[in-house]
Image (tube, rainbow, N blue to C red):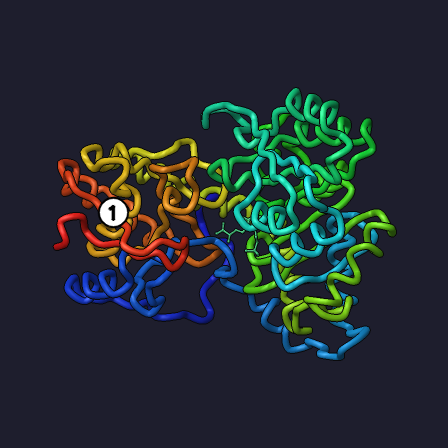
Amino acid sequence: MEPGMEPYRVKSVEEIPFLTAKERKDAILKADFNPYRMLASNITIDLITDSGFSAMSTKQWSAMMLGDESYAGSASFERYQSAVQDITGYKYVLPAHQGRACEKVLFNALVTEGSVIVNNNHYDSTKTNISLNKGIALDIAMVTDDTADFPGNMDIDKLKKVLEEKGEEIPLVMITVTNNKMRGQPVSMANIKAASYVCKAHGIPFILDGCRFAENSWFIKEREDGYGDMTPREIAKEMFSYADGCMISAKKDANSTMGGVLAMNSEDLYDQCVPYVIATEGHTTYGGLSGRDLEAVAVGLYEVLDESYLRYRRANLKFFEEELISQGVPGVFPAGGHAIYLNANKLCPKIPADEFPGLTFAGLLYIESGVRCLDIGSFSPNASDLIRLAVPRRVYTTEHLKYVARMIARVAEKNKDRETGLTMTRSRTKSAQYKHVTGS
Ligand code: F0G
């Protein structure tokens, strides 16, 4: 099979809106240039996230019809639990409504004031859930460039050092695969294994943030010695085997619109988490999800490990990357698993750094094309000039991505000498508002 050929055919379609340039300009002004404040009904191609926006399969939709909505002991939970156990190898399974709910439960159980949680890189909600429990999130990713095979890796020397110095204050160590905050770059099996050994030597639980575990498995298959002949499922199982448990946002690598997985080997840890699931998510056999959501996750967890799907997913992103490169668009290449990152400082080099070049470019791109993307800078101070184009799973075809690449190149060309960006008129992350610095 051609790697880039979709391993599925279209059975149901959803129209996408095409607005006029004037309508788009009005729409973005109304949203005060904040991508989160825009109406989805005004977006032609939506690359704001890869989360909860996957196209579900006929098997998922039909499984949803079997959803057992019983309050306790539902058959849907049995199927969800068995899929999680089968794929991860962990014995104890708790559902939660999404990834951050798993984080809340786990950190409520383990984090106290002054606790230090170590990770290659914490995702934003992970960091917030740690700080809400008065803990400290410590990022120790390896400093490397994106041409390395596994730029998402953790710095194992730093891990050893921090566990020696602060071991008492560390209730758990995490590793995030792929590493979203490191541009979705993968983590090697060797790195996961090494981190696992260090944690074991210190008796500290090691938990995988496996939101994109299947994509990470594919990178290991492609790039790491000894894994080329293994199936993604075998690779994923090995990855999970080095950790004591995992959190998965099923909105990513389970191709579901909603859902989370918290799984572990330790009965003690399970017992510690249960009251927090019950208090805020629901009974342990639904955990914030309807029976039909549990069914979609149970099927999606297998589908996302399917070799032809993963080969296609990788080829789809690679195609997008190559289109951008061929049009001379400055980005972070080679790209990671779920998104392409563009470099706003190079796209619009004359816009001052404090005038949000990334957000300005995102706004201009929307006005030109109806494409929504996200500038990382306004929300993550460490990446002030990056724009993320996240690609949802099974949603957009190569023609869609070709269009996006062409529009980006066009906007870049038109704005290479632009000298003004945006100014913030109202702060507060996702409700922030901006206007053009000149007021126009
Ligand atoms: N961990 C990682 C690595 C993530 O990327 C996300 C979400 C979460 C945890 C939280 O999961 O959304 O189900 O609560 N990332 C999305 C994104 C939202 O756009 O990158 P959630």
Left or right: 120 as drawn, with respect to 169: left
- The extreme right residue here reads 267
Q: Position of residue 433 (x, y in %)?
A: 30, 57
Among the 4 quarters of the image, the one containing residue 334: top left
Q: Position of residue 370 (x, y in %)?
A: 26, 59
Classify the position of the C terminus by image quarter: bottom left
Q: Between residues 427 and 302, which one lies in front from this camera angle?
A: 427
Q: Does residue 30 sit above or below 154 in this rendering?
A: below
Residue 258, relative to residue 390: is it above or below?
below
In this view of the protein, can residue 217 be seen by the observer?
no
Identify which residue is drawn at 75% across, 46% down. Answer: 245
Residue at 78% across / 54% down in the picture? 85
Q: Nearer the viewer, residue 213 or 247?
A: 247
Q: Is mark 1 within 8 Å of ligand 1?
A: no
At mark 1, the secondary structure is: helix
Vertical placement of residue 396 versus 341, above or below: below
Instruction: Answer with the quarter of the image where residue 177 lies.
Output: top right
Residue situated furthest front in the rendering: 113
Q: Amino acid at mark 1?
A: Thr
Image height of 236 relative to 48, above or below: above
Query: 385 and 430: which one is in front?
Result: 430
- The residue singled out by tag 1 in the image is 360
Q: Tell me the crowding category of disc 1: few under 14, some 14 to 19, or many 20 or more residues within 10 angstroms, Cα based.
A: many
Q: How many discs appear?
A: 1
Residue 138 locus on image (x, y percent): 60, 34
At a point 25% along the width and 55% down the height, the residue shown is 366
Residue 253 visible in the snapshot: yes
Q: Is residue 50 left or right of residue 238?
A: left
State the image coordinates of residue 98 (x, y, percent, origin top left). Answer: 61, 60
